[in-house]
Image: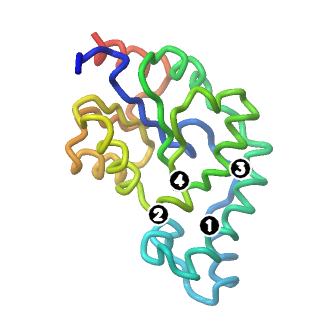
């Protein structure tokens, strides 16, 4: 296969890259702990450790209700439309949020058709699962992953993905676009 720009995949995180969800995660974690009757230290860790169980589904439905409410008032981060419009290749969202909530948000901003696929809960319970799914289709050398979590960047690197961009290292969207230009040329 010819190695052209259109054969590259841009993979974006949702909460922290595309938007900043209007959710107080600490309060939600405490509410979820009460609801499940167990101490939840990390919502993401809970999903990963209980994937496929009744606890997973109860937690997923509980958190999804809050995410669906939050996407109604959350705003598209500055410059994200420009980034996804600028990038000519395949685009994915890899998130630990509900796929349904993400799609609802993208429809609101008329961006849903921009992405080949939204990867999230309940199909996936970890960023690693999502990235493995993508590199099963696109070579790790042609994946550009952008996330605001240092841990997810480490996961990305551990899978051999060539371009793992920590959003917090690039203060403005113009820096991301400049970086994409450098990668693609």
User: In front: 122, or 184?
Assistant: 122
Question: For the view shown, which residue lies furthest in the bottom direction?
Answer: 37
Q: Earlier in the sequence, mark 3 or mark 4?
A: 3
Q: Position of residue 180 (x, y in %)?
A: 37, 19
Q: Position of residue 105 (x, y in %)?
A: 70, 40
> Circle 2 is placed at which residue position?
125
> Relative to 31, is 140 above or below?
above
Marks 2, 3: nearer the viewer:
2
Give the residue at mark 4.
120
What x and y, as percent, mark residue 62?
Answer: 70, 70
Give the mark nearer the N terminus: 1 vs 4.
1
Question: Which residue sits at x=50%, y=70%?
Answer: 47
Q: Quadrant of the C terminus?
A: top left
Q: Which residue is disc 3 drawn over? A: 22
- Which is more N-terminal, label 1 or label 2? 1
- The residues tagged by marks 1 and 4 sit, at their Cα atoms, a distance apart of 21 Å
């Amino acid at each position: 296969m010819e190695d052209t720009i259109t054969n590259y995949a841009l993979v974006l995180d949702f909460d922290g890259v595309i938007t900043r969800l209007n959710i107080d995660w600490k309060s939600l974690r405490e509410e979820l702990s009460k609801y499940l009757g167990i101490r939840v230290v990390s919502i993401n860790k809970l999903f990963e450790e209980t994937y496929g169980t009744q606890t997973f589904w109860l937690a997923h439905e509980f958190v999804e209700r809050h995410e669906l409410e939050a996407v109604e008032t959350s705003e598209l981060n500055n410059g994200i439309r420009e980034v996804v419009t600028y990038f000519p290749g395949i685009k994915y969202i890899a998130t630990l949020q509900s796929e349904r909530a993400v799609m609802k948000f993208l429809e609101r901003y008329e961006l849903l058709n921009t992405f080949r696929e939204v990867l999230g809960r309940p199909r996936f319970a970890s960023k690693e699962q999502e990235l493995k799914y993508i590199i099963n289709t696109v070579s790790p050398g042609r994946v550009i992953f952008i996330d605001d979590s240092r841990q997810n960047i480490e996961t990305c690197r551990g899978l051999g993905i060539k371009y793992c961009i920590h959003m917090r290292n690039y203060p403005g969207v113009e820096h991301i676009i400049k970086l994409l230009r450098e990668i693609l040329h």
